[in-house]
C-alpha cells in the first residue's frame, strides 16, 4: 500500500510537537500528555503504557477497524503486532477461533517453534532475581499467583519436577493421593510438547503460559474473539477462562528487556468486540488485568486519514485547508473503514468534498431515491390546502406545519455542521380529539406518499426510568442488547419517516434526555454502538398538557373562547410542565415548533360528523351491500346541540364520535334483527324526542316490474332527490316499507 503524506501533512500543533515518537520510545520529560502522531493511534500508545506498568490488557471495541500506523493504513492485527514487536517482543503469536495459532510477523513462527520445542527451564535464574530486585515485574510470577517455572524446586523442599519422557518418581510415603494428582497435572502442563504446534485452545494456552512464565525470551500472544469460542453463559467455558487468566498472571519480565525501567512483562492479551461478553470475574477481580476500550479515531487521526485520501474525493485536488477541517469535524464518530468508504461515495455519487452535509447524507442513508428531492414543487406550495382537507378546523396548525415543510424542502437553515438536524420538529398541543394525530398521518402521506412512513410511539409506555432503554437499546450485557432500540432500529430501516411521540408529557424525564440529543445533533447511538441518523425525519410530539383546565375556562362563558386566549393558555402550560420536569432546555429547542390546536368550533362540528357518517355508510355498503342514507335535516341540529355543552367541547372530535355511537348501535341492531336484502336502503334519522330511528326501504322486483320487465325503486320520505311523501306512503302500502326500528331515548 502506498505511503501517505507523512505525519507532518495536515497535522495540528500538538501533533507537530510530538515529533516522530515511535512505539517504545522514551516518554517526554516535560510532563505533557502523549498525543497521536503519524506512527500509531492513541489506543496503541495507551497499550504500551499499560504493558510497562506490568498489566495485561483486554482490548475491546472497534477491533475490526483500520488504523493509521507507521505512516500508512493498517489493520488492527498489524497495529497490535507492530506495537508489540517495537517494544521488544521476539515472538508475537495470534490466536483466533478460525485460524488457530498464527504469526503475523515474518520469522516469528520459526522462533516460536524453537522455544516450544526447548525443554523447560530448570529454575528461574536471573529473571526471578531481577523481579525481586524491582527492575522487572514487582513480586515476580509468585506475586501474580501464577504457577512457578517448570522444573523449579517446590517451596516445601520436594524434588523438582521431571522432564518430558522421564519416568514418574514414586510418591513419598504418606502423601495424599490428591497431592500426587496435582503434582502430575503440573508436570503435564509444563512438560515439553511433542513436535508440531499446538492446535486446540487448551494446548495453546498451556504453551503460552509456559513461555510467558519463562524469562529466557520476550514473547507476546493475543487471543482474539475468545468470547465466541468460550461463551460466558456456558459452565464448561469457566475452566478455559481460568486457564487463560492464569497464563496472563504468570507472565514475567524477560532477560532481554532493554531501555528505561520499568520493563514490560511478557504480554498475554485478549481482543474482543465487547468486553461485556466476557465473565465479569475474568478481569474485574484481578487488578493486574486492565480493559482498554478502542473507540473511533480521534480528530488528529481523522485528519491523517483524510489528508492521505484527499485525492480520492470528488473535488479533493482543489480542496482548501478549511474544506479539510470541515470534513474532519463532520466525520466525528466515524471509523477508519467508513472514512475510506466515504471517499468512494464521494467519487461514485459525484458529491464534492466541499459539501460535507450532502456527502455524509448520501453516505449514511445509501439511498438512490431521495423522497424530498422527488417532491413536486407545486405539491409543497399547496401543502396547506392538502392538509386542511384532512384536518378540519385547524387553520393555524395547518399553516404552521405547511410553512415548516416548505422550509425543509428548500433546505435553508442556519449554518451547517455535517450532522444535520431533523427536517422539522413540532410540538402539537391542544385539546384532545382535535386532529393532532391525524395531521401527523397527513404529513407522512403528503411528503413521502406512503402511510407506512408514519410511526407512532405511545409515550404512556415509557413512564419508568428504565424505559429509556427501549428507545436506544439495552446496554451491553443486558437482556435484549442484541436487538437494539425500537426507535433507532426504526430509523435505520426507514430513514425517511414521520415519527410521532404521542402524549409526551407521560414519559419519564430520563426519556426526554434521549430527545435532547436527537434535536441537537440529529443522531442517536444504540447500545450496540450503531448510530441512527434523523436528518431526514420529521419529529412530532403531541401533548394534552393544559387540557384538564379547558372545561373550567369554558364554563360560565356566553360567547366562544377566542383562539388567542386558548393559545396563550396552552403555551404557558407546556412551558410550566417542562420546567417542573427540570428539562427547560428541551422546550427551548422545541419552542419554534410549538403548534397550539384550536378547540372544535360549531361550524366544524357538522363537517366532522358528515365524515364519520360517510365512513359508516361505506362500511355497511362493503360488508352487507346495503345503502345507508342519513337524514341530515335531523342529524345536524342534534349533533350540534350535543356538542355545545362545555363538558362535551373539551373532548373534541372524539366526543362527536361518541355521540354518533348511538346511530351506529341502532344500525347494527337493525341489520341483525331484520336482515335487509342486498340492494336495500336504510335510512337513519333523529326523532322528536332525540331517539335514533332506522328504516329499511327495498325494491320488490316481482311487484314493481312493469310490462317492459323493468324494476322500479320506491320513493323514500325525507331524503333529497326522492319522490314526495305520498309516493313513499304508496310504496309502503305495496310492501316497499319493510321494517322500522327505533332506539335511543332523549339524550
Image (cartoon, grey):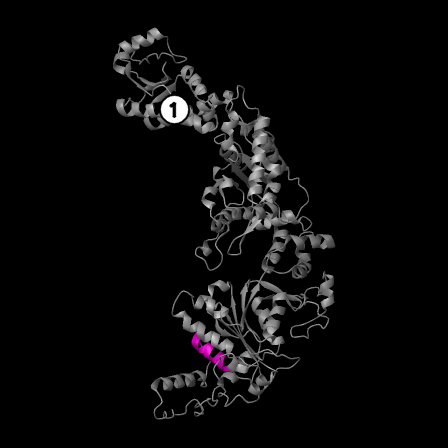
- Front residue (pair 425, 503): 503
Name the spot of residue 745 as percent of width and height, x first. 34, 19
The answer to whether any part of residue 399 appears in the image is yes
Q: Is residue 597 left or right of residue 230?
A: right
Q: Nearer the viewer, residue 457 or 703?
A: 457
Q: Magenta region: which residues?
A: 199-212
Tag count in the figure?
1
Give x and y (percent) for residue 509: 53, 46
Q: Quadrant of the C terminus?
A: top left
Q: Is residue 416 above or below residue 113?
A: above
Secondary structure under tag 1 reads: helix
Between 680 and 488, the one nearer to me in the picture: 488
Residue 334, how many percent across, how many down? 60, 56
Magenta highlight on residue 211: yes
- In the displayed structure, does residue 586 sit left or right of residue 625? right
**Residue at figure coordinates x 44%, y 25% from the top left:** 656
- The rendered magenta stretch, by its main secondary structure, is classed as helix
Which residue lies under the disc numbered 1? 617
Quadrant including the N terminus = bottom right
Is residue 356 part of the magenta span, yes or no? no
- Residue 256, percent from left and from top: 61, 84
Task: Quadrant for residue 699, please give it.
Answer: top left
Relative side of 28 to 289, left or right: right
Q: In which quarter of the image is residue 55?
A: bottom right
Residue 367 visible in the current orientation = no
Choose top left, top right, bottom left or bottom right for residue 692. top left
Amino acid at each position: 500500500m502506498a505511503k501517505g503524506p507523512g505525519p507532518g501533512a495536515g497535522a495540528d500543533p500538538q501533533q507537530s510537537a510530538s515529533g516522530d515518537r515511535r512505539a517504545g520510545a522514551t516518554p517526554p520529560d516535560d510532563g505533557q500528555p502523549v498525543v497521536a502522531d503519524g506512527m500509531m493511534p492513541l489506543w496503541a500508545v495507551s497499550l504500551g503504557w499499560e504493558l510497562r506498568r506490568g498489566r495485561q490488557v483486554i482490548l475491546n471495541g472497534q477491533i475490526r477497524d483500520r488504523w493509521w500506523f507507521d505512516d500508512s493504513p493498517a489493520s488492527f492485527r498489524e497495529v497490535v503486532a507492530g506495537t508489540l514487536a517495537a517494544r521488544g517482543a521476539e515472538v508475537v503469536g495470534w490466536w483466533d477461533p478460525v485460524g488457530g495459532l498464527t504469526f503475523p510477523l515474518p520469522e516469528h513462527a520459526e522462533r516460536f517453534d524453537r522455544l516450544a520445542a526447548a525443554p523447560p527451564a530448570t529454575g528461574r535464574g536471573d529473571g526471578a532475581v531481577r523481579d525481586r530486585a524491582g527492575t522487572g515485574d514487582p513480586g515476580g510470577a509468585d506475586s501474580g499467583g501464577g504457577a512457578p517455572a517448570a522444573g523449579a524446586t517446590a517451596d516445601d523442599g520436594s524434588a523438582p519436577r521431571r522432564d518430558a519422557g522421564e519416568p514418574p518418581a514414586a510418591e513419598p510415603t504418606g502423601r495424599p493421593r490428591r497431592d500426587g494428582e496435582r503434582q502430575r497435572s503440573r508436570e503435564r502442563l509444563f512438560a515439553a510438547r511433542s513436535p508440531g504446534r499446538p492446535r486446540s485452545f487448551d494446548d495453546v494456552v498451556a504453551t503460552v503460559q509456559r513461555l510467558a512464565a519463562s524469562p529466557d525470551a520476550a514473547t507476546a500472544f493475543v487471543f482474539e474473539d475468545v468470547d465466541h469460542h468460550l461463551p460466558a453463559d456456558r459452565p464448561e467455558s469457566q475452566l478455559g477462562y481460568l486457564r487463560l487468566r492464569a497464563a496472563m498472571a504468570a507472565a514475567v519480565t524477560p532477560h532481554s528487556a532493554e531501555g528505561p525501567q520499568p520493563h514490560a512483562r511478557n504480554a498475554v492479551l485478549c481482543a474482543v468486540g465487547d468486553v461485556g461478553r466476557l465473565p465479569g470475574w475474568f478481569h474485574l477481580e484481578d487488578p493486574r488485568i486492565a480493559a482498554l476500550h478502542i473507540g473511533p479515531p480521534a480528530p488528529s487521526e481523522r485528519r491523517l486519514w483524510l489528508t492521505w485520501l484527499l485525492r480520492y474525493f470528488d473535488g479533493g485536488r482543489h480542496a482548501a485547508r478549511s474544506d479539510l477541517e470541515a470534513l474532519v469535524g463532520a466525520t466525528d464518530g466515524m471509523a477508519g473503514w467508513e472514512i475510506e468508504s466515504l471517499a468512494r461515495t464521494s467519487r461514485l455519487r459525484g458529491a464534492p468534498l466541499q459539501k460535507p452535509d450532502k456527502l455524509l447524507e448520501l453516505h449514511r442513508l445509501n439511498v438512490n431515491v431521495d423522497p424530498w428531492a422527488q417532491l413536486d414543487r407545486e405539491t409543497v406550495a399547496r401543502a396547506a390546502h392538502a392538509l386542511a382537507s384532512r384536518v378540519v378546523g385547524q387553520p393555524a396548525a395547518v399553516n404552521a406545519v405547511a410553512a415548516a415543510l416548505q422550509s425543509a424542502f428548500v433546505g435553508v437553515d442556519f449554518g451547517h455542521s455535517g450532522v444535520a438536524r431533523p427536517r422539522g420538529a413540532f410540538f402539537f398541543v391542544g385539546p384532545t380529539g382535535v386532529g393532532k394525530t391525524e395531521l401527523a398521518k397527513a404529513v407522512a402521506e403528503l411528503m413521502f406518499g406512503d402511510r407506512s412512513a408514519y410511526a407512532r410511539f405511545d409515550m404512556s409506555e415509557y413512564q419508568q426510568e428504565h424505559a429509556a432503554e427501549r428507545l436506544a437499546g439495552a446496554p451491553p450485557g443486558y437482556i435484549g442488547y442484541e436487538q437494539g432500540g425500537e426507535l433507532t432500529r426504526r430509523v435505520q430501516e426507514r430513514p425517511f419517516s414521520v415519527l410521532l411521540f404521542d402524549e409526551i408529557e407521560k414519559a419519564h424525564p430520563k426519556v426526554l434526555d434521549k430527545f435532547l440529543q436527537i434535536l441537537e445533533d440529529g443522531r442517536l447511538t444504540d447500545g450496540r454502538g450503531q448510530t441512527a441518523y434523523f436528518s431526514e425525519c420529521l419529529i412530532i410530539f403531541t401533548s394534552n398538557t393544559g387540557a384538564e383546565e379547558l372545561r373550567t375556562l369554558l364554563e360560565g362563558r356566553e360567547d366562544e373562547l377566542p383562539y388567542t386566549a386558548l393559545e396563550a393558555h396552552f403555551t404557558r402550560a407546556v412551558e410550566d410542565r417542562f420546567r417542573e420536569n427540570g428539562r427547560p432546555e428541551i422546550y427551548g429547542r422545541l419552542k419554534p415548533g410549538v403548534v397550539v390546536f384550536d378547540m372544535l368550533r360549531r361550524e366544524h362540528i357538522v363537517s366532522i360528523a358528515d365524515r364519520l357518517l360517510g365512513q359508516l355508510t361505506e362500511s355497511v355498503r362493503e360488508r352487507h351491500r346495503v345503502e345507508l342514507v342519513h337524514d341530515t335535516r335531523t342529524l345536524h341540529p342534534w349533533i350540534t346541540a350535543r356538542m355545545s355543552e362545555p363538558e362535551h367541547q373539551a373532548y373534541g372530535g372524539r366526543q362527536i364520535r361518541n355521540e354518533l355511537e348511538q346511530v351506529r348501535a341502532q344500525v347494527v341492531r337493525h341489520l341483525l334483527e331484520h336482515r335487509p336484502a342486498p340492494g336495500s336502503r336504510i335510512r337513519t334519522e333523529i326523532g322528536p324526542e332525540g331517539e335514533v330511528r332506522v328504516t329499511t326501504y327495498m325494491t320488490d322486483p316481482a311487484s314493481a316490474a312493469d310490462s317492459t320487465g323493468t324494476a322500479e325503486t320506491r320513493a323514500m320520505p325525507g331524503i333529497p332527490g326522492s319522490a314526495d311523501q305520498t309516493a313513499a306512503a304508496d310504496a309502503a302500502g305495496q310492501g316497499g316499507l319493510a321494517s322500522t326500528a327505533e332506539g335511543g331515548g332523549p339524550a
